[in-house]
Each structure stands twice: as C-alpha cells, then as structure tokens.
Amino acid sequence: MNSRKSPLRMAAAAAATILACLAATGTAAAQEVKARTMKFAFSLAADHPLGQGAQKFADLVSEKSGGKMKVSIYANAVLGGDPQNLSAVRGGTLDFTSMATGLLAGIDKRFMVFDLPFLFNDAREAYAISDGPVGQRLLGGLSEHGLVGLGIWDLGFRNMTNSKRPIAQVQDLQGLKIRVIAAPVYIDMFKTLGANPVPMTFGEVYGALESKAIDGQDNPVGVILSAKFAEVQKYLSLTRHIYTGMPFLMSRKTWDGMSEAERKIILDAAAEAKAYERKVSQAKETVAIEDLRKVMQVNGLTPEEVDRLRGAVKPVVDKFAGEIGPDIMQQVAAEITALRAKN
C-alpha cells in the first residue's frame, strides 16, 4: 500500500489546520473583549445630530463587540455641563464626552485655531483641517491631559438669535447681551463687535433667554432647533461667523485599561460614527433653516456686510493667532490655500 498521502487528503488536512488556527484566533480575540458598560454624556439633545452620532457609536460598539461592550447615553447635560463632563472624563469617572473646540482652549490654547472668526468658507474646509495633520496633532496632544481624542465631530456654522432685532449689520449688535461659550475667542469677538458677552454653560441658556437675563445667543441652526430656542427668541440672523467642531473625547484611564482588541473596536466605531454624524448634521442644516423660518424672523447678511464683520474682528484674529502659535497658524493657512486651489 502506498504510504504517501494523496493531494486531496493533504489539502483537507491543511484546511483543517487553518480552520483550527482561525478558531483559536477568534477565541483569543473574544477573550480580549471584556463585558463592560461605559457612559457617554454631553450637553446637547438626544435628537440633535451629535446625539444621533452618539447613539450610532453606542450601537456600533455593541455590534462590534458581540454585545459585550455597552455605551449608555446621557444627553441634555443630565450628568452636568461641559466643564463637569470634561473634568469627569479626565478623572476617569466618565468614559466619553463631546464639546466645542473652544472649551478645550483652557487645556491647550492651540485649539482656538478652530474658533477663529470666518476662518472656513464651508464644512469641507473645516473637515479637512479637523481630519488632517493639524487636527491629528492637536488631538494627539490631549493624551497628556488625561484624554484620548477620537476625532472631531460636526456642530456646524454658528448663527445669532436674539429677542430685540434682526442683525443685518455690525451696528445691530451694539449693547445686546449675548450668551457665549466660556472661551476667550468668543468673549473678545463679541466685545469687539459692541455686544455684551455673557459666558454661560449650554444647559442654562434656555432659562436665561426665557427670563430675559440675556437677549440672545449664537449656535448652529441644528442646535437652535433642537434646543427649542425659537420659543424664547424672535430673530435668527444667518451670520455663519464661526465654525464649531466637537472633539469626541475618551477618558485615558478607560483607554489604558483596554486590550488592543477593545481599542480597535472603539477606534473603528468612532470613525464610522463621525462620518455618520457629519452626514446627519449637513442634512439637518438645510431642513432646520426651513423649519425655523416658520416660527422665527430669519435674515441673511449681504457679502459686503460679511466683509465688514470680518474686518471688524481682524484684531481678535491677530491677537489669538499670536497665542495659538505661528507654526499652527502657518500650517492651517497652507492647508486651506491648497484646498481652495483645487476648486
């Protein structure tokens, strides 16, 4: 009898070996994913695009981990405002949060570059800077502050609402008490334009508008709609003066306690959720403006008036460019120039 194995039997044996190895690898990977429940808290409403992105992230984490890893969503500042959430994530008592780039300027002044007035012409430019070398450099630097930057989500271009009058020119801002993010760029910009900026956490804004403690606020239209500001504001002026990105932040303590398999699940889910959130945010903007036109007096600005606004805030841009640093400023300018050259 021939002792040599037939090619068919050899192939079958090889296939069995490969399947055994794959099964072992799969078992090892499964063992690296532990059952855990994590918390994701933020200030915006659950039905806002960011809230929808958060839910998408939670769904993806569950799906990719075979149901072992769960993310509980806490919207509407129920666990605290942005400062409390940031502190909790840095301390490891909260796993995820998302907030405006301007609020991270207290940790790293270079984040102020995203909040310079009239820096971006459109979302495409903002996304390119957020996802490119500048964004990755700044997110990477958060590690030394107890944070892991998982990308920059989209809040959109900010517009102004108030209860006094339409804002069609610079003079219309004179004397208005405007709620602002507690970030130096915002405070100085509104002061320069003649308004009285009032720093305030987002969760306090509706009540302050309702009680007339402040006259107005600035936010992207998706936020204005989901926060129901139209109930306490009459005028919406489409100024698009600042673009606001929302860094998606994770506690480094949580990250450090994870296996490589778990980290990959988080990274993959975060990347997919960012793309989804941006898509929802872009679609929502057009719809939100039309919905708000039904309940608010909406006006735009002429190109000439936008140029006047840009000129009026140039001293603010120049001041904070010095604090941000010439290397970041030059890198952003070069990237934007290259993007516009492609058009």
Image (cartoon, rainbow, N blue to C red):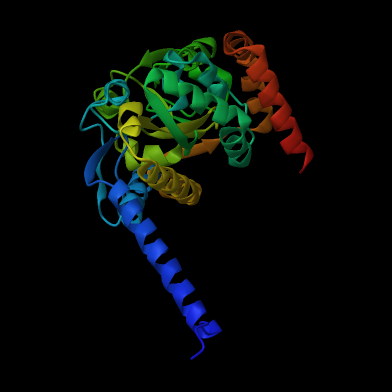
Left or right of 18 in this view: 91: left
User: 300 above or below 164?
Assistant: below
Q: Quadrant of the C terminus?
A: top right
Location of residue 295 by image quarter: top left
Outermost residue toward the front in this view: 1
Q: Nearer the viewer, residue 109 or 321?
A: 109
Q: Nearer the viewer, residue 286 or 185?
A: 185
Q: Decide if residue 158 is in sight here.
A: no
Left or right of 38 in this view: 285: right
* Residue shown at 20% from the left, 33% from the top: 78
Please provide percent x and percent y for residue 133.
Answer: 62, 31
Outermost residue toward the right in this view: 341
User: 78 above or below 87?
Assistant: below
Q: Nearer the viewer, residue 242 or 54?
A: 54
Please provide percent x and percent y for residue 178.
Answer: 40, 19
Q: Nearer the viewer, residue 325 or 216?
A: 325
Please provide percent x and percent y for residue 148.
Answer: 41, 29
User: 142 above or below 106?
Assistant: below
Please provide percent x and percent y for residue 317.
Answer: 61, 15
Q: Decide if residue 93 is in sight here.
A: yes
**Tally of numbered discs:** 0
